[in-house]
Amino acid sequence: FTMVLAQEPQEPPKKPPFRYNFGVGGMWIAGNLNQMQFNTSGLITYDKNHMGNDLLINGYRIYMKPQGVEDFIRIGDDLSITTIPFYYFHPHIYGFGIGHWSTSLLHRIDSRIFAGGGVGYAPDRRPDFLVRAGFGAFYEQTAFPEESFNIDIEPDGRTRSVARVGLI
């Protein structure tokens, strides 16, 4: 005897428009370097099918204890925040903008602002997997703590402004 029950087909669960991922970590390097590093990162994504935004936050702090020195010295204190809004004109073609701010004690950067936009292609775009790349034009302005940040570049004060083209 066999009994079969029929049910109406159910729609697959819809993905929520907001997704997030946060992480913290650290490491200790003993020996010649004697370094400690603490890092944090975060990703907040809003994706409403044809438009959305990715917000990335990364930061780390590095301490070093040179040979013969009693206390650790802070040598790295970096933070970056990036936002990438996007809009799909076609299932695989999209336009994007980018805004970025960062500061880095390790690289001797007081602040860096980066903004621009472009067009991109997403060959594989599924709810659980995404591959995309874009080409665009960008403007960067970086402020350094000193006027002579690089001996190979003619100094123009503490700020450097550059136009760029590239992949993202």
Image (spheres, grey):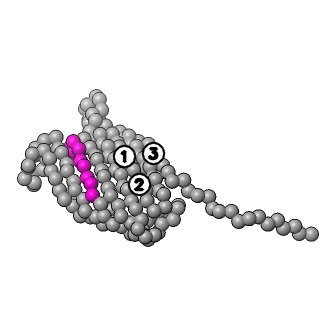
The numbered disc on residue 69 is: none
Q: Quadrant of the N terminus?
A: bottom right
Instruction: Report the mark closest to the observer, 3 or 2.
Output: 2
| Residue 154 image point, x, y percent | 7, 53
Q: Is residue 3 left or right of residue 41?
A: right
Task: Report crowding for label 3: few under 14, some 14 to 19, many 20 or more residues within 10 A (C-alpha).
Answer: few
Q: In which quarter of the image is residue 104?
A: top left
Q: Name the residue under label 2.
A: 53
Q: Is residue 97 above or below residue 72?
A: below
- The residue furthest top is 70
Which tag, 2 or 1, sits closer to the chain's start?
Answer: 2
Pointer 1 with pointer 3, Cβ within 8 A: no
Residue closest to the far right: 1
> Which residue is the site of mark 3?
23
Q: Position of residue 49 (x, y in %)?
A: 49, 61
- Classified by dominant secondary structure, the portion drawn in magenta counts as strand
**Which residue occupies the foreground of this view, 11 or 145?**
11
Question: Is residue 159 located in the magenta-colored stretch of the structure?
Answer: no
Task: Name the residue tied to disc 1.
Answer: 58
User: What's under tag 2, amino acid-wise?
Assistant: Asn
Which three-letter amino acid code belongs to the residue tagged 3?
Gly
The quadrant of the rendering that contains the C terminus is bottom left
Q: Which residue is pictured at 74% across the width and 65% down the height?
A: 8
The relative height of residue 41 versus residue 10 in the rendered view (above or below) is above
First in sequence: mark 3 vs mark 2:
3
Is the residue under label 1 in contact with that under label 2 (CB below 8 Å)?
A: no
Range shown magenta: 106-116
Q: In this view, does 1 lie to the left or right of 143?
A: right
For this view, does 7 lie left or right of residue 50? Answer: right
Q: Which residue is drawn at 26% across and 39% down?
A: 75
